[in-house]
Image (cartoon, rainbow, N blue to C red):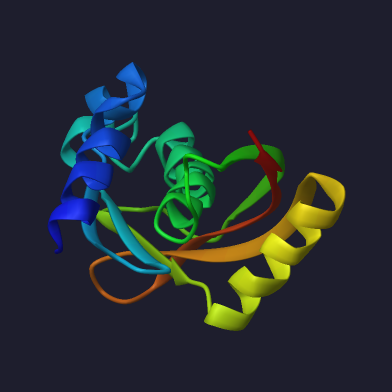
Amino acid sequence: MEEKYKALAAYLESAIGIVSQMGLKVVDMKERYVQLLMPLEKNINHVGTMYAGSLFTLGEIMGGAIFVASMDINKYFPLVKEVQIRYRRPATTDITVETSFSEDQIRNIVAVLEEKGKSDVPLELNLIDAHGEVVSIVTGTWQVRKK
């Protein structure tokens, strides 16, 4: 991971206290791409699977993380507008999520931002267990705004 992204990854892992306590890790980050991991160990619920709130957090934080990896955070900032999660099966391992933007997607987001001061961006994210199974699907709209 490039030095620029190491600093951004460290920020994402530590900026929000509860996220840090959950042990969320940035596995990989590069221009317009992020992969995150939520460890099972710190997030076990009363029945021995991953706590539903930890799964939700993993998906929700990705919406901000992908913008951090894709845009100038000195000019723009992301906010969550709406997020939904569908729990498909119990999560019994560490869980990962990854997403990316194309150059064209970023150009379009920035064009709307420059014209309107904000841009709504829908995302659909698959939360994957260590066996490659989708345990949850997070869908939502994140809004990027000019500072």
Determine the residue positioned at 46% across, 38% down: 57
Q: Which x, y percent locates residue 12?
A: 32, 38
Determine the residue positioned at 35% across, 69% down: 31
Vertical arrangement, residue 95 with respect to residue 39, above or below? below
Query: Residue extending furthest top?
Result: 17
Determine the residue positioned at 54% across, 80% down: 103
Quadrant of residue 17 in the image?
top left
Comparing 38 with 71, the one in front is 71
The quadrant in which the C terminus is found is top right
Q: In this view, does 77 lie to the left or right of 55?
A: right
Q: Which x, y percent locates residue 33?
A: 38, 69
Query: Residue extending furthest right?
Result: 116
Q: Can see residue 39?
A: no
Q: Is residue 137 left or right of residue 36?
A: right
Comparing 46 with 5, the one in front is 5
The quadrant in which the N terminus is found is bottom left
Vertical arrangement, residue 56 with respect to residue 124, above or below? above
Q: Which x, y percent locates residue 102?
A: 53, 80
Determine the residue positioned at 31% across, 55% down: 36
Comparing 38 with 27, the one in front is 27
Count up the numbered dots: 0
Q: Which x, y percent locates residue 37?
A: 27, 53
Q: Can see residue 69?
A: yes
Vertical arrangement, residue 37 with respect to residue 125, above or below? above
